[in-house]
Image (cartoon, rainbow, N blue to C red):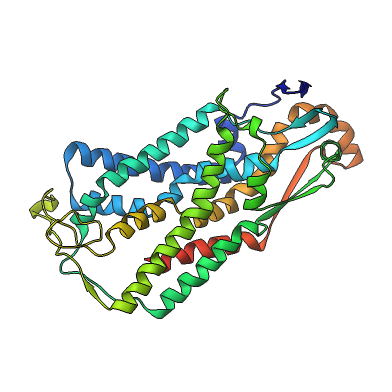
Amino acid sequence: AVGEPGEDTIVYMYVLEVSDVIFKMPGVAAATTFGVLLSSTRMLAVVNIALCGLNAYLARFVRWSIALGGWGMIMPYMFAFTQIPSFYARIVQFGQVWIDMGVQINAAFYVVILGLYLCDGASLMVYSRCSAATAKAPQVAKRPPRFALLGLAAALAALLAAPWFTLWTHSYSGVVGTVIHYQNGGYTRPISIAMVLSHSQDWLLNPSELGIGIYIMQFIMVVHAVLAPVLHAVLALYVGITLRWQGPIEAVAAVQPARGGQISDAGSSASFLSTSAEAKVPFRRTGYLLVLARMWSGADAMAAAMVLIVPDLTAQLNFMSAQACDPMDPMLTQLHKGCNVLTSEFNGGLLVLFLAGLAGRVFAE
């Protein structure tokens, strides 16, 4: 509630605990746990490389986990695409004074975000060595098949259009839910990437008093769900077209693992991230961008995670509304009506986003 223009008065009705997520939102718990485990195991592997040296098994694991880096960002996707747009409502407004409802995201979440990006930075620092450890020699960049280039082109077109597709639709009902959403002018809310970006309430996203929460959230949504997948497809398409036009390109010889699986720091990689100065490596600069774009590409991961997360939003709203709804339960039971009800229905846009992101990832490889 706003008492004076520009001055916010916040009343906290419910504070979400970890136990609520584990026992009442199993889909959210499963999806976010998978993402945290993926990022955590990659970080442990990178620390092991830094402390104990490189071996072929760790190098292979780090390379593959970097390739799936976007799947480790499921927790940020969950907050950005469900908590921000699903529960906000402006209940009553008189001029510049209003009462609204929403989910506030606090500073601890942004500490988690910082940890995820530090993990990405540390992973990139060892990627060249991991690439050298697992490359095979001799290696020749061959012409990619036509169907791969056509698939990349189709995935790119779908990724460019996906931000405007409706991913899922929320419907609000019940005695309290009808009152809360009456002034919004409707009881259904179509969710798309463009809608979330344009309807984020900045004061609910501020970590403490810094006022940067809205920009961090928009960065996560734009970079991981739109920009990185598109850039990944564009760069892979450029490399593929160049290879078909110029023909096979012989790369630098690779370093073979030493006995026992240990890898020497000397030598070069057969990949475009080779550190060798003896020969010119094709697509060197493009290669760095490809690795970064592939690591941050998360359109397919976000869409897959939402299949588990969105159905649990109904349970979340139920226990968030319990303080107001529990006293009315006997009366509402007799009337056969709900209190504050949220139902969600998936739309075709979510499937398009998942298939486009996955196709771009597969055809790029």
Number of numbered callouts drawn: 0
Rendered residue at 43%/34% (across/down)? 114
- Above or below — where is 61 with respect to 241? above
Rendered residue at 41%/35% (across/down)? 115
- Above or below — where is 249 with respect to 230? below
Q: Position of residue 9 (x, y in %)?
A: 72, 20
Quarter the C terminus occupies: bottom left
Q: Is residue 324 left or right of residue 243?
A: right
Q: Is residue 269 left or right of residue 302?
A: left
Quarter assignment of residue 272: bottom left
Q: Is residue 30 visible?
A: no
Rendered residue at 41%/43% (across/down)? 37
Q: Is residue 169 left or right of residue 222?
A: right
Residue positioned most to the right: 335
Foreground residue, 112 or 48?
112
Foreground residue, 362 or 311?
362
Residue positioned most to the left: 259
Q: Position of residue 293 (x, y in %)?
A: 41, 54
Rendered residue at 43%/50% (across/down)? 296
Q: Is residue 125 left or right of residue 4?
A: left
Foreground residue, 237 or 118?
237
Q: Is residue 314 visible?
A: yes
- Above or below — where is 241 with respect to 104? below
Q: Position of residue 112 (x, y in %)?
A: 46, 34
Quarter the N terminus occupies: top right
Q: Position of residue 96 (x, y in %)?
A: 81, 28
